[in-house]
Amino acid sequence: MKNFDRYVGIDWSGAKAPVFTKSIAVAYCEAGEAPPCLVRGPQNGKWSRTAVADWILSLLKTPQRVLIGIDANFGYAKHVGISQFGKSYNYKTLWGDVEAKSKQDANFLAQGFWEAWPQYFWTEGKQPAHITLPKRTTETVCGEAGCGWPESPFKLLGPKQVGKGGLAAMRMAHYLKREAGDKICIWPFEKHIADTSQIVISEIYPRQFLRRSMHGNAKVNSLKALNEVLQKQGTDKIKKKRIVLMIMMPMQSFLHLVYACYAVVKKRYQNPYPTHRF
């Protein structure tokens, strides 16, 4: 894959409210060893999902080639998609149906979709017997490789659930492709255009980057700890003058800063995600 000029990490959220929230964060770094920087959201520093999408589109006005990582799934277990849409199902089928069934939901919320397919999603109470929470190949490979076991996209309740954010990301992907076409590539579904697109967007699993930095499962909750992780990725330290920004960040955003720097290291390779399988 061709190299990039800028690397972006996005801490995503699938929550219904508030629309503008500190639970969403955006960080970037340029190619090289400079540390990552936060991007302030448009409403008192806060972001909405649609604001993130429009910010991504604004990057097309620059000459830079950009790699974006976001902690959200753009697809789910293939056999589930086939059971819903038939053997001809692909990512476009899924994104289109999520959008069609949720177009009345603001800010890329996808409640209309999961309510239309209740037999697949765990939304309340104890786990129903018929909800099996199937995993994708990428989640299974991640767990077997010792990088941690991601939550199933079909679990839509609890503090660790990721399913709502994934469905919202599919709506965002549908929107970005409608607005920008092949200028934006959603990897790996569109890997055939990855070298020619100006922006490439990929799902990431942030915790594995902490493990690859020999940080284990401990939280990154101080500037000192963050700088130790960044240095192991070959990135300069964040200076004290930025600490005010850091302590205002949601905890998960620390992990995405680590991701952004990790992406800089991986720029030297043809494939920036050699172990990512779907």
Image (cartoon, grey):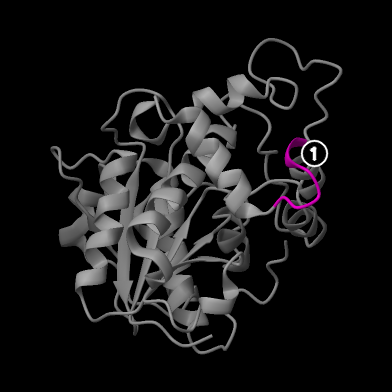
The extreme right residue here reads 129
Quadrant of residue 177 in the image? bottom left
Q: Amino acid at mark 1?
A: Pro
Q: Nearer the viewer, residue 132 or 258?
A: 132
- Residue 160 visible at all: yes
Assign the C terminus to one quadrant of the image: bottom right
> Left or right: where does residue 172 sit relative to residue 147?
left
Image: 95 above or below 200: above
Would you name the residue on which mark 1 appears?
Answer: 134
Quadrant of residue 19 in the image? top left
**Residue drawn at point x = 32 percent, y = 53 percent:** 26
Q: Position of residue 150 (x, y in %)?
A: 68, 45
Magenta region: which residues? Answer: 84-89
> Left or right: where does residue 277 sit relative to residue 269?
right
> Left or right: where does residue 217 sit relative to residue 46?
right
Q: Nearer the viewer, residue 73 or 83?
A: 83
